[in-house]
């Protein structure tokens, strides 16, 4: 259950980070903030997929 808590914490922090980057973009109109936000979303998506695969393999191995 600790992994789920860590994943939720990472998702929450990433969401706050992306919102702050979007606010920085609105304030400065500098597209580098949008690029950083896009990369952050990609990294969080990869982490979520990796966690889902880890969870799936764990469940399959427990039943084997």
Image: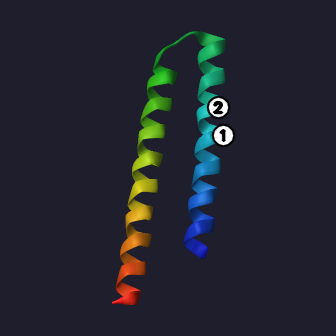
Q: How crowded is mark 2: few (under 14 residues within 10 Å), some or many (20 or more)?
A: few
C-alpha separation, residue under disc 1 versus residue under disc 2: 5 Å
How did the renderer colour the structure?
rainbow
The residue most toward the top is 29
* Depth order, front residue of 20/1: 1
Q: Quadrant of the N terminus?
A: bottom right
Residue 4 image position (x, y, % from top left): 58, 67
Residue depicted at 42% across the width and 79% down the height? 59
Where residue 19 is drawn, which disc sits there? Answer: 2
The secondary structure type at the circle numbered 2 is helix
* Residue identified by numbered label 1: 16
Considering only vertical position in the picture, is 59 above or below 15? below
Pointer 1 and pointer 2: residues touching (CB < 8 Å)?
A: yes
Residue depicted at 65% across the width and 30% down the height? 20
Residue 33 image position (x, y, % from top left): 51, 23
Residue 13 image position (x, y, % from top left): 63, 48
Considering only vertical position in the picture, is 48 above or below 58? above
Where residue 44 is drawn, which disc sits there? Answer: none
């Amino acid at each position: 259950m600790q992994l789920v808590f860590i994943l939720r914490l990472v998702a929450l922090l990433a969401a706050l980070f992306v919102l702050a980057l979007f606010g920085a973009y609105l304030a400065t109109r500098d597209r580098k903030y949008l690029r950083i936000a896009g990369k952050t979303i990609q990294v969080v998506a990869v982490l979520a997929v990796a966690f889902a695969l880890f969870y799936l393999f764990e469940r399959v191995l427990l039943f084997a």
